[in-house]
Amino acid sequence: MPFPDPATQSAVLLTVRLAACTTLLLLLIATPLAWVLARSRARWSAVLGAVVALPLVLPPTVLGFYALMAMGPQGWLGQLTQSLGLGTLAFTFTGLLLGSVVYSLPFAVQPIQHAFEAMGPRPMEVAATLGLPPFEAFWRVALPIARPGFAVAAVLSFAHTVGEFGLVLMIGGNIPGQTRVISTLIYGHVEAMEYPQAHALALGMVGFAFVVLLALSVIKRRAPRMVA
Amino acid sequence: MQAAHTASDAHIRLRLARAGFVLDVDLRLPGRGITVLFGPSGSGKTTLLRCVAGLERAIGVPDAHVTMAGAVWQDAASGVFVPTWQRALGYVFQEASLFAHLDVRQNLVFGLRGGRGGHDDAAAHAGLDEAVALLGIGSLLQRRVDTLSGGERQRVAIARALARQPRVLLLDEPLAALDRSRKQDILPWLEALRDRLQIPMLYVTHAMDEVARLADTLVLLEAGQVRACGPVAEVMVQHLAAGGDEAGALLEATVRGRDATWKLAEVVFDGGSVWLRDSPVLEPGRRVRVRVLARDVSLALAAPAGTSIQNQLACTVESIRPDSHPSQVLVRLRCGTATLLARVTARSAAKLELITDRAVWALVKSVALVE
């Protein structure tokens, strides 16, 4: 058992689970969004781009507040989930997951969008002249060429979710085993003056952050997979 | 060449406003050989080619129409617009545009249905093998595309376009991104395609040497309009004559023989024969194209004796037109079925009393093999 106590183990595993699920969902959502933002020259796509980027500048507490309002028994999302017999999402893992997806959305969309933009229209045109229907061309050409963008998006989404705190506290509370992640556990330790425990976790986070940044710079060093 | 305009199964009628110009063309083109779209940059030739491919779309034009190789690809009247991927075409871009995440072979089979386990595997691969042989890239198949030279890349790109056996091949300045010697590497392959393939090609360029060497039919574009369209020799003397040192005639000729002593070769065309510098490619019986520049042709009323000029051709004056400088005129000469151009001073033309149908001797100082 690599963890000193069950509380730490549960928080670490929960953090990893949350970050992994968030990353997976984000890649699914961000890919079509990034494609539209990279390709469309329409005016509404500028608006869409700004909306997607909102979480970059808003304090997590603002996002958390609105998420809490929406998920609550009187909120639109809460009404929806209640009518489906799911209860409310506030202070649950699912609620936390939804919040995380919104919170990290720009970190997933923007690297993919930039990869599609850097690719330009030519590869898809080449694929069309070679007889590939659009969706197949997207699958066999755009996705492989934009792969480094996807790698960056995945790493950033995962890391950003691991590092979130304000939002978790707002919509997750700090329930052990359900919504208590590493960042809130550290906060708890500090509140309780348990500095050695806080120290161990904090140091782990520093190490994790370093590994993430190293991974990013390795991805970016790789030769860009562009059309010759 | 005469048959070229009877087999007219390509029809392009498009109108399209772009920043800086309006493309407005109505072209009927022969269903075989190389048709070169020639014009300065900004004349709309690439836009025209992209419209033919369906990569750009003229929207809201009531009579837009594209028929290529007998298939209707666009017809505004009946609401037809076949998307690019359903058009049986091959397209070669200015930059080779190979997929760097695939090796050469994977690039080549990329567009093959059979390459993904379809039932027409054998037929698909026959096209692939032929394309590989036509462009001489058999030794490159296992290479990564970023290890290829510029010329090799473009040959792979052409083979990739041909591998799926298109009914028409569209080439957008395929040599423009290459330096001179790379260009010389590829031109013979393009000539081989023209001579061996049955499909028509639309070829965009702004380089005169490519026109002289490859074109069967020439379309001159200027500011989005068609200025001329016809067999290359005709269009060149009629429309590319005025102004410029490049003005001249293009002759289709056959090598008759070589003179080893003087290192010369004689080529015959319908109208006479001329001598030019010998070259290893001038094997007797081979068909070649030669250029005779207007500035290298002088005129005499009688066959002169005691001159250093060996190439003397009996011609009749067809027309006399002012040249770019008022001191000069451009004389069009009929020589058999061929046409020559001579650039002489207006004073000489007056002194020789040149008039239409007058018999003259064209003294040709220099003949260049187009290669």
Image (cartoon, rainbow, N blue to C red):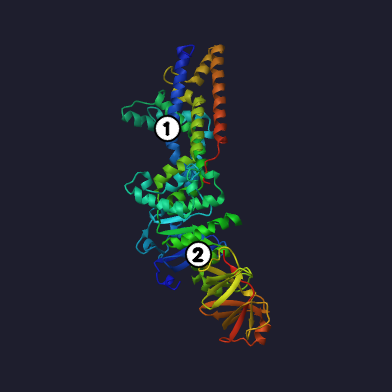
The residue carrying pointer 2 sits among few (fewer than 14), some (14 to 19) or many (20 or more) residues within 10 Å by Cα, namely many
User: Badge 1 sits on which subunit?
Assistant: A
Q: Which residue is identified by label 1?
A: A25
Secondary structure under the numbered disc 2 in the rendered image:
strand
Residue closest to the far front: B261
What's the distance in space between the residues labelled 2 and 1, CA to CA? 51 Å
Is residue A6 at all visible to an observer of this figure?
yes
Position of residue A200 in the picture relative to residue B61 (left or right): right
Residue B248 position within the rendered picture, expressed as x and y whole percent measured from the top left: 59, 73
Of residues B164 and A55, the one drawn nearer to the viewer in this rendering? B164
Position of residue A6 in the picture relative to residue A207 (left or right): left
Residue B29 position within the rendered picture, expressed as x and y whole percent measured from the top left: 44, 68
User: Is residue B200 placed above or below A65 in the rendered structure?
Assistant: below
In terms of image quadrants, where is residue A71? top left
Is residue B318 at all visible to an observer of this figure?
no
The reply to whether discs 2 and 1 touch (Cβ–Cβ < 8 Å) is: no
